[in-house]
Structure formats: C-alpha cells, structure tokens
Image (cartoon, grey):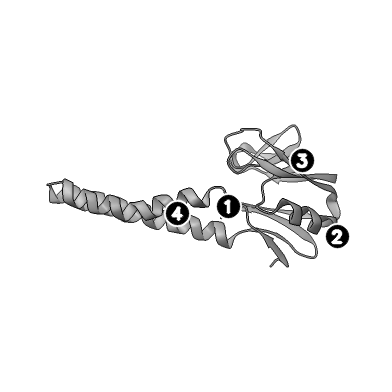
C-alpha cells in the first residue's frame, strides 16, 4: 500500500518482549508451585493465551506502520485504528516533542488529533483544510492539526515535505 513506512512502537516493544519472554517462566513456576491439577490447567490456559496475545500485538505493531504513498498519509495503531489523510491537505509538517497525557492512543484536543505513544508525540502536521476524524463511540470530529508519534520523526517530516 505505502511507498514509505514508519514504525511507531519502539517505546513499547521492549516491554512487550519482556512479558513475552517471562510468560514461559511463569508457566513453569505455576507448574512447580500449584498442587491442584485443575488450577494448573486453568493457569496454563491463561498463560498460553497471554503469550499468544502478546505475540499478536507485537506482530500487529510491526505489520501496521504509518505509511506515505503518492496520495495519502496513513496513520495507524496496530488494528485499532487507521486514518487516511490526503497529502494535498497537509500544509506543514514539523518535528517537536510534546506530551499531553490524554491516556488514550487517540483523542481530539482543541481541533487537534492526538495519536500518543507512551503519552508523547513528536510530529506535528498542520492541515490547510479540516479533515473529519471518526473516534468511534466518541464521535466524529473535524481537525486542523495532527500530532502523532513515529520512531523516525526527521525522516517522516522530510517525506511529508516532498
């Protein structure tokens, strides 16, 4: 789909890997410490499910990156959301760290779409025309700016300025 892709999960990936690596150790400890078979079986099932979900999340963060193609900037977070912004609607793109702490991966604050990773953003895009953004149960909003996180903000800004 995209000509250039940009990751956004470098901050959270190490934590996911730690939990994924520790899950088998947890399963072994449960097998050694819990005397009841029925409880060991239930905890084993939860441990296996936990490992599968962590592996799935890691894969989704790797597969669904932000992308820029000939017509659009695609902003994503795994399979949770995907926003398509026309490149023609982008007026300026700048690199700069901000922290809003909205405690959500996506929100609209003062006509700005905020896509945070670990409560931070590092790219600001000003739009020359408002774009409608659907936040699901929180409704649709018109935005004139977008703040988001990418692992390589300088490269993203250079790609958006072309």
Q: Are marks 3 and 2 in contact (CB under 8 Å)?
A: no
Q: Is residue 151 left or right of residue 86?
A: left
Q: Decide which of tag 4 and tag 1 comes sooner along the chain.
A: 1
Question: Which residue position is annotated with label 4?
Answer: 17
Q: Which mark is residue 10?
A: 1
Viewer-side label of 4, 3: 4
Real-space CA distance between mark 4 and mark 2, rounded to the nearest whole angstrom: 36 Å
* Residue 35, image x, y percentages: 12, 47
Q: Are marks 4 and 2 in contact (CB under 8 Å)?
A: no
Name the one closer to the observer, 94 or 106: 94
Question: Which residue position is annotated with label 2?
Answer: 162
Q: Which residue is depicted at the point 20% across and 53% down? A: 41
Q: Which mark is residue 143?
A: 3
Q: Decide which of tag 4 and tag 3 comes sooner along the chain.
A: 4
* Residue 137 image-quadrant placement: top right
Please rate how many residues cluster around mark 2, counting C-alpha atoms within 10 Å: few if below 14, some from 14 to 19, many from 20.
few
Q: Which residue is depicted at the point 47% across and 48% down? A: 15
Q: Decide which of tag 4 and tag 2 comes sooner along the chain.
A: 4
Viewer-side label of 4, 2: 4
Real-space CA distance between mark 4 and mark 3, rounded to the nearest whole angstrom: 35 Å
Q: Are marks 4 and 3 in contact (CB under 8 Å)?
A: no
Please rate how many residues cluster around mark 4, counting C-alpha atoms within 10 Å: few if below 14, some from 14 to 19, many from 20.
some
Please rate how many residues cluster around mark 3, counting C-alpha atoms within 10 Å: few if below 14, some from 14 to 19, many from 20.
many
Real-space CA distance between mark 4 and mark 1, rounded to the nearest whole angstrom: 11 Å
Q: Is residue 75 left or right of residue 128?
A: left
**Looking at the image, residue 151 lies above or below residue 3:** above
Q: Are marks 1 and 2 in contact (CB under 8 Å)?
A: no
Q: Decide which of tag 1 and tag 2 comes sooner along the chain.
A: 1
Question: In the rendered image, is residue 39 in sight?
Answer: yes
Q: Is residue 121 left or right of residue 33?
A: right
Real-space CA distance between mark 3 and mark 1, rounded to the nearest whole angstrom: 27 Å
């Amino acid at each position: 789909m995209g000509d250039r892709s940009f990751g956004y999960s470098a901050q959270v990936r190490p934590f996911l890997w730690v939990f994924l690596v520790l899950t088998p150790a947890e399963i072994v400890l449960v097998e050694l410490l819990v005397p009841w078979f029925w409880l060991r079986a239930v905890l084993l099932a939860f441990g296996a499910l936990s490992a599968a979900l962590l592996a799935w999340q890691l894969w989704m963060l790797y597969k669904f990156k932000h992308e820029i193609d000939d017509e659009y900037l695609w902003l994503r977070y795994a399979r949770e959301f995907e926003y398509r912004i026309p490149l023609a609607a982008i007026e300026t793109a700048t690199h700069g760290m901000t922290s809003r702490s909205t405690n959500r991966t996506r929100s609209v604050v003062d006509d700005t779409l905020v896509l945070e990773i670990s409560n931070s953003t590092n790219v600001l895009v000003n739009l020359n025309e408002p774009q409608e953004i659907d936040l699901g149960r929180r409704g649709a909003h018109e935005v004139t700016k977008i703040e988001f996180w990418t692992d390589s903000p300088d490269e993203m800004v250079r790609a958006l300025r072309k």
